[in-house]
């Protein structure tokens, strides 16, 4: 412990701006406090009673100039409801804290990249949190290359999504509450990635779960949304149980829960214990990052506002599981069985979610299943020990999936506004009600195509590089690595990894198909929104388009973070790989079997060619097969039949869980726990029963109280005689 | 001498106990209680010959307490009499379960 203190004091970052890293989470926390106070103390505020007067006020206020542009289609008679009383203040504070945090993160990043010798993480201890005997847990933050990348993604993408939310949520009565939750989420997310030990990370882990619950059920007056929030919360509890057990096992075996201590002592662990710890950690990941069997909450989480889906359920929170495995790389590298489990579950999740995505009609549901599928890819990456590749895909996915979600938000915003203007109650999220939107939303159209090509893996967009890196990693390790020599449930690792590679490739095909399908049905073909509604369709205000543009640029060029050696002519190769080397380099090497996983250039070219060919084939197949002109609006649609119906119903997994888990649990709760245990045993026997027993004894005892003094006198005398007799004749 | 005194004290005490147990009139019972107290006083005084002055000191205490008790007890009996027109303990049994 003392040695570490000395090391911390001498750390090269200790006198740079990095010592301000505690400010990173504190800034969003301050935003939460202020916005939360505004939300609490303003209460629900409807604003002026006369909507026409309100809209007139808005129009003449210079500060609301974009208001006119936004509602050019909706004229005075369809004026938006008055905004929240503190909307202006909240719109400044909410995004501002995020931009400030991002600025600080960039400054710290600058300090880190200009500092040499950063092999050791920079740990800052603030106070002793749980000093309990041998267990010493400090409230401490740890800055290293991995958490730096995560902080940059969270604050950067988070800031853009906050900005988008200013436009998207502008008329919501819960405007300050929304920003308060969003800021709180960013706070917890930063605690998660900056925590220097598993317990500190767990605070963030639980906190983001809480914020996810609060934001999924943001419009809680609708029961479906509240239920979706509950589902997410309960399913995540199962995963958190795994996280806790893993921490207990770590403590029981090496009495250390901070990352530095674990990396020093991990080799003391028995192989079976490491496997158990890793599997329990992976259970936690499966909950948080929506993997089989716990992925069911994520599609339902789309009940929340779209910026929430973009920030929490695509870009940041759901990738926490990937981060956890990369952070625990030291442990996972010791257990080939656990790593292979991660790979297999990730691959199957990627495939399953992609098949479901083929037949969804809700634009956000398509993206939700796409997210689950891409998370599966990331797990395949970190599972095969290509930790840098997994993190790389995490970063690029954050860019293009946030862009896709925000783009869908822009579409939904336009659709909702159009339906609002004509007082229609049609579904603003159903693709069957869209079509031909490229004429009305040209910016969104172009930017979402960039993201679609990126996720499909078309070079030179970001998704191509990251997905290719993962697939190449799998292929390389299938030939020679620790994993290839291990076996999983009796299956040898090598063939298993080749199969996973095949699944990955096939999933890439499906990805290209369902994403192209979504784009074709949304933006191409004839418009199915309705004749009256078409007049009200239009691009969103600049606060919503600007983040899209920035994310579009990032989605396009994000691949330059980690260019393969093969394409070294494009720029400095493998930057992210080298950057993350101090954190995950040793475990990567260990999994790869002592030497870096390497492929012959010819093989690598063949793999890249196959991946690109598959992506192009998927897109062409979708373009050739899908006929948007034959689609009809949602109300006239005929139900699916055959296998398409199975996919549209998500393989009936929800129904299966309902039958196998939910209903038995509810049935046992109602019939056994409620009527027998609670009503009969606890209420009847224990609570009321003991009370009745005491009443009975009391009634008997009360007969002794006759009120007659002579009886008492007799009792006293007899008592005295008994006592004296006992003393006399003992 | 002590033996006789203790015997006499025991007789007086038993008479008092018998009176408390058998009589119904509150005044009589009260007097029987006083008799029991004074029987004890007698044995205190008698035993103080053997064991020192403490026994006689106790007697003073007992008499003081008995006087206070008499004051309170007689007052209660008087108020009961005002209520019931007699002091028969068979009628006084309101404090029961």
Image (cartoon, helix red, strand yellow):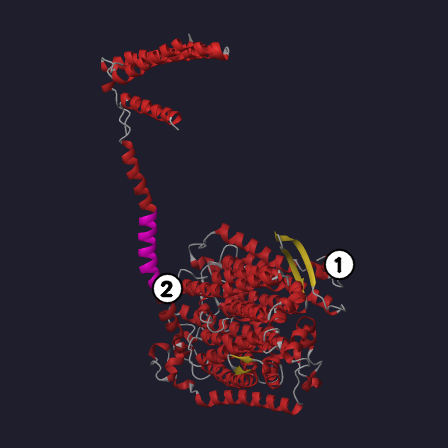
| Up/down of A50 relative to A432, above or below | above
Q: Is residue A143 left or right of residue A414?
A: right
**Distance of label 2 from label 1 (alpha carbons):** 54 Å
Q: Is residue A565 visible?
A: yes
Q: Position of residue A132 (x, y in %)?
A: 60, 52
- Give residue A404's mark: none
Label 2 Cα crowd, 10 Å radius (few <14 / some 14-19 / many 20+) = some
**Who is closer to the viewer here, A142 or A719?**
A719
Task: Report helix, strand or loop for mark 1.
Answer: helix
Q: Report whether mark 2 lies on the same chain as mark 1.
A: yes
Quarter occupied by the C terminus of chain A: top left
Quarter occupied by the N terminus of chain A: bottom right
What residue do we see at 42% from left, 85% from top?
A: A628
Identify the chain of the residue marked 1, using the numbered disc in the image: A
- Give residue A665's mark: 2
Q: Which residues are magenta?
A: A667-686
Circles 2 and 1: CB distance less than 8 Å? no
Q: Position of residue A480 (x, y in %)?
A: 63, 85
**Who is closer to the viewer here, A615 or A525?**
A615
Secondary structure that dominates the magenta span? helix
Q: Position of residue A609 (x, y in %)?
A: 59, 90
């Amino acid at each position: 412990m003392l040695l570490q203190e000395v090391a911390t004091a001498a750390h090269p970052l200790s006198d740079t701006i990095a010592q301000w890293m505690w400010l990173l989470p504190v800034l969003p926390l301050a935003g939460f406090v202020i916005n939360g106070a505004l939300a609490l103390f303003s209460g629900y505020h409807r604003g002026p009673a006369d909507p026409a007067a309100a809209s007139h006020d808005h129009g003449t206020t210079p500060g609301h100039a974009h208001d006119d542009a936004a509602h050019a289609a909706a004229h005075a008679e369809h004026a938006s409801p008055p905004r929240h009383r503190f909307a202006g203040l909240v719109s400044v504070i909410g995004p501002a804290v995020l931009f400030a945090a991002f600025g600080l993160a960039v400054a710290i990043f600058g300090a880190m990249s200009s500092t040499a010798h950063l092999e050791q993480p920079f740990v800052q201890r603030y106070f002793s949190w749980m000093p309990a005997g041998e267990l010493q847990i400090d409230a401490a933050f740890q800055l290293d290359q991995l958490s730096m990348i995560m902080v940059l993604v969270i604050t950067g993408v988070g800031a853009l999504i906050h900005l988008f939310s200013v436009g998207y949520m502008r008329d919501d009565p819960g405007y300050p509450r929304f920003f308060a939750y969003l800021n709180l989420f960013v706070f917890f997310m930063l605690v998660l990635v900056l925590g220097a030990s598993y317990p500190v990370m767990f605070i963030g882990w639980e906190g983001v779960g809480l914020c996810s619950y609060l934001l999924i059920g943001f419009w809680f007056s609708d029961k479906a949304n509240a239920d979706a929030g509950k589902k997410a919360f309960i399913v995540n509890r199962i995963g958190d149980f795994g996280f806790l057990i893993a921490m207990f096992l770590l403590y029981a075996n090496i009495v250390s829960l901070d990352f530095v201590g674990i990396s020093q002592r991990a080799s003391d662990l028995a192989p079976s214990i490491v496997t158990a710890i890793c599997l329990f950690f992976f259970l936690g990941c499966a909950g948080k990052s929506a993997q089989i069997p716990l992925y069911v909450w994520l599609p339902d989480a789309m009940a929340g506002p779209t910026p929430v889906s973009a920030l929490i359920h695509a870009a940041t929170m759901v990738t926490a599981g990937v981060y956890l495995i990369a952070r625990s790389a030291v442990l996972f590298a010791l257990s080939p069985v656990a790593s292979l489990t991660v790979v297999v579950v990730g691959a199957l999740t990627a495939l399953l979610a992609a098949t479901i995505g083929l037949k969804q009609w809700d634009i956000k549901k398509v993206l939700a299943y796409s997210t689950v599928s891409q998370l599966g890819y990331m797990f395949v990456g970190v599972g095969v020990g290509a930790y840098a590749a997994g993190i790389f895909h995490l970063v690029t996915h954050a860019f293009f999936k946030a862009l896709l979600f925000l783009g869908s938000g822009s579409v939904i915003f336009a659709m909702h506004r159009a339906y609002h203007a004509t007082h229609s109650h049609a579904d603003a999220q159903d693709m069957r009600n869209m079509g031909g939107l490229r004429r009305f939303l040209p910016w969104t159209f172009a930017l979402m195509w960039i993201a679609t090509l990126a996720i499909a893996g078309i070079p030179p967009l970001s998704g191509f590089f990251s997905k290719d890196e993962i697939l190449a990693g799998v292929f390389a390790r299938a030939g020679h690595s620790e994993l290839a020599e291990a076996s999983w449930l009796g299956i040898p690792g090598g063939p298993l990894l080749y199969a996973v590679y095949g699944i990955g490739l096939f999933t890439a095909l499906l990805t290209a198909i369902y994403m192209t399908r979504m784009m074709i049905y949304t933006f191409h073909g004839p418009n199915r929104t309705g004749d009256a509604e078409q007049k009200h369709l239009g691009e969103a205000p600049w606060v919503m388009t600007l983040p899209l543009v920035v994310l579009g640029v990032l989605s396009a060029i994000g691949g330059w973070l980690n260019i393969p050696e093969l394409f070294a002519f494009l720029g400095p190769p493998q930057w992210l790989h080298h950057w993350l080397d101090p954190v995950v380099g040793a475990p990567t090497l260990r999994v790869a079997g002592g030497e870096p996983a390497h492929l012959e250039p010819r093989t690598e070219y063949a793999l890249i060619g196959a991946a690109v060919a598959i992506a192009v084939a998927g897109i062409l197949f979708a373009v050739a097969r899908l006929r948007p002109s034959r689609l009809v609006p949602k109300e006239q649609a005929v139900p699916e039949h055959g296998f398409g119906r199975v996919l549209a119903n998500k393989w009936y997994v929800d129904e299966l869980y309902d039958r196998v888990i939910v209903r038995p649990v509810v049935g046992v709760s109602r019939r056994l726990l409620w009527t027998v245990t609670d009503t009969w045993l606890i209420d009847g026997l224990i609570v009321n029963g003991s009370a009745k027993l005491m009443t009975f004894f009391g009634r008997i005892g009360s007969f002794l109280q006759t009120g007659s003094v002579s009886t008492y006198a007799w009792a006293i005398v007899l008592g005295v005689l008994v006592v004296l007799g006992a003393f006399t004749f003992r | 001498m002590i033996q006789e005194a203790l015997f006499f004290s025991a007789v007086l005490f038993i008479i008092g106990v018998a009176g408390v147990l058998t009589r119904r009139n509150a005044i009589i019972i009260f007097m029987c209680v006083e008799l029991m107290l004074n029987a004890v006083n007698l044995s205190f005084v008698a035993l103080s010959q053997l064991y020192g002055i403490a026994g006689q000191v106790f007697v003073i205490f007992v008499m003081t307490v008995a006087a206070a008790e008499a004051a309170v007890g007689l007052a209660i009996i008087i108020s009961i009499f005002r209520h019931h027109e007699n002091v028969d303990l068979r009628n006084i049994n309101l404090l029961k379960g």
